[in-house]
Amino acid sequence: MIGLFVRDAAGLRPRVDIEVPPLVPAVEARASLAPLAVPEASAQWARWWDRELTRHEEPHRGFLAPESRFGGGEELGALMRECFDDAVRWSSARGREYAEAMMRGDRRGHEGDLVRAVETELGRKARPFELQVMELPVAGAVGWRVSEKHVVVSRALREDAEAYRRWLTSVIRELA
């Protein structure tokens, strides 16, 4: 999420294959970052984002701790350093919100229930499969299939149980 915070705070508009809406709660663009928000920083952000979406070994690491891989360039690194502390605070608050939702039971069992519903529909047990569901706090009820085993969904989509079920069922049906 730090990378998305930097994108929004700097007002970057990188060209990427999977364009993700602004964060929620909104991160205001900062005038102080404008001198650093050069086209090369956007290009570096786009390269970083595309790598993050396709990385399966440690899918959340880059969102939480971009470290030196963050875009691989000085321009984006300068932006990251300038707002890193605020990005960490913002990201930590979203993490606490997610943990609280888990504790309330808001994020438990939806995928398992969907697998069982698909099994009933198919009249058989699902084949073994893996599916990584990455939730991001972005505007709108949206989702993207990054690869066969990896989807990204907005918090709003995941919180709307019926919309989430409709969206994810076809993915699970294909994998099952």
Image: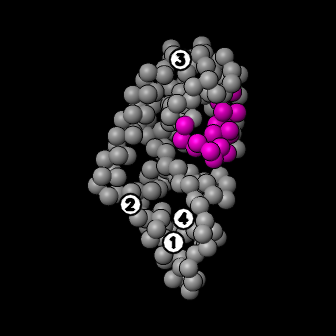
Q: Is residue 20 visible?
A: no
Locate residue 60: give its quadrant.
Answer: top right
Element under label 1? helix
- Residue reaching furthest to the left: 104
| Contact between labelled residues 4 and 1, with CB atoms less than 8 Å apart | no
Q: Quadrant of residue 4?
A: top right
Disc nearer the start of the sequence (2/3): 3
Say which residue appears at 34% left-offset and 40% top-offset: 96
Q: Which residue is mark 2?
A: 108
Mark identifier at residue 67? none
Q: CA distance from mark 3 to mark 1?
A: 43 Å
Q: Which is nearer the N-term, disc 3 or disc 1?
A: 3
List x then y, in percent, for residue 83: 49, 20
Label whose residue precedes the other's in the sequence (4 or 3): 3
**Residue with the mark numbered 1:** 115
Q: Residue at x 44, y 50 (%)?
A: 155
Q: Which mark is residue 81?
A: 3
Q: Tell me residue 32's x, y (percent).
A: 50, 14
Q: What residue does disc 4 label? A: 168
* 3D distance between C-alphas at marks 4 and 3: 37 Å
Q: Is residue 51 magenta?
A: yes
CA distance separating discs 1 and 4: 10 Å
